[in-house]
Amino acid sequence: MPRVTTAAATLVFTLAMSAARGAAGQTLPTLKVVSDSAGIHVRPALLSETIMKVNAGMTLEAIDREDDWYWVVLPADEHGTRYPGWVRANEVEIVAAGDPRAVLRHFSDAVEQAKARMDAQAAEDAARLERARQKVEEAREAYDGLVKNGPAGSQKPAAQTQKTPVRVPSEKPRANVPREYEWFGGYSFYRDQSDGESFGGGWALSGARQVTPRIDLVGTISASHRGEDILGVNVASSSIHTFAGGPKYAWPARDRFTPFAQLLVGIATVSSSAFGVDASSTGFALQPGFGVDVPVRKPVALRLGFDVETIHAGGGWFTGFRINAGLMVVTGSAK
């Protein structure tokens, strides 16, 4: 996917290289806008996007120069955030000498804070997944205990028990819950292995129609989101929306839980934004996966699923894995 979520780190690295050149060569100046309405651009080109207009008299700190353009840092906004941009040399004049390393420290501190928040979020996501896994395991153990022991006082005297006809198990395996339609909704965590990024905010919805006693036709919608803040201001965000469908095979119920595997194919839309610049692309998505359904009470079950999602968008292939946890409800009757 477009790697705009790393824009803050890339910006600081670029500023560091610029500061090193300034320290080794010349000390870049402090500038004052002399034009009535000077344009601050994304790149040193007149046709590039304009970030904002500044009035005459505003002071700007230069951190690099390229031909007839100065790379400057704007004054702090109401949130205390400073953004970079390019201004033409004929729209400003030199008023004092400056040191770009002083500007660089502002961005370095901001990125360190953002990195600390990302690490804390990753640890929180890992803890949330572990709690979900423990809850599924506790529910399965509780269900096994209930089935094995039965409700209190349900045991009958030996003489009466002997009169009860013995049930002969059917040769054909039976599912825990008769089903015709399956509906699932829950939390979704996505990890992009290509860029090493975690999407902690997400959800997944799916519906399935029984085709044979073991094969269903599935349709899914899932969404994942992540963002980066600097000094409390969101500067970069990414989101993935996947629409896929395909077959799902469910094995016969084993020890009161039902494992399944599925192979889904569809499309994925990848959207991103950094420093006010938006980008998006749509491409092919391949999503094989597997999971397990643990009955809680008919017709409700806990579902824990794991998918490997491969996306071709923006001219490249990206691979990650998705973990879904939530409730599955069955409706209709078994075929």
Image (cartoon, rainbow, N blue to C red):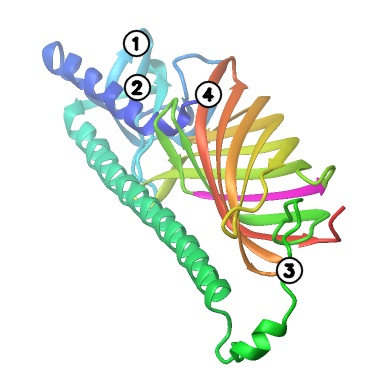
Callout 2: SS: strand
Find residue 324 and name its label: none
Q: CA distance from mark 4 to mark 2?
A: 34 Å
- The single residue placed furthest to the top in the displayed view is 67
Residue 334 appears in which quarter of the rendering?
Answer: bottom right
- Magenta residues, dominant SS class: strand
User: Is disc 2 in contact with disc 1, using a CB cutoff of under 8 Å?
Assistant: yes
Dot 1 alpha-carbon crowd within 10 angstroms: few under 14, some 14 to 19, many 20 or more: few
Q: Earlier in the sequence, mark 4 or mark 2?
A: 2
Q: CA distance from mark 1 to mark 3?
A: 87 Å
Which residue bears the numbered disc 3? 167
Closest to the camera, between mark 3 and mark 2, is: 3
User: Is disc 4 in contact with disc 2, using a CB cutoff of under 8 Å?
Assistant: no
Q: Is residue 319 left or right of residue 261?
A: left
Counting from the top left corner in percent of width and height, residue 65 is at: 31, 14
Which residue bears the numbered disc 4? 318
The magenta segment: 201-209
Closest to the camera, between mark 1 and mark 4, is: 4
Q: Earlier in the sequence, mark 1 or mark 4?
A: 1
Callout 4: SS: strand
Q: From the viewer's side, name the closer residue of 241 and 11.
A: 241
User: Is disc 1 in contact with disc 4, using a CB cutoff of under 8 Å?
Assistant: no
Residue 112 appears in which quarter of the rendering?
Answer: top left
Which residue bears the numbered disc 1? 66
Instruction: Inspect the magenta stretch and tell me whether residue 204 lies in it.
Output: yes
Callout 3: SS: loop
User: Is disc 1 in contact with disc 3, using a CB cutoff of under 8 Å?
Assistant: no
Find residue 71 and name its label: 2
Task: State the residue at coordinates (30%, 21%).
Answer: 14
Dot 4 alpha-carbon crowd within 10 angstroms: few under 14, some 14 to 19, many 20 or more: some
Q: CA distance from mark 3 to mark 2?
A: 84 Å
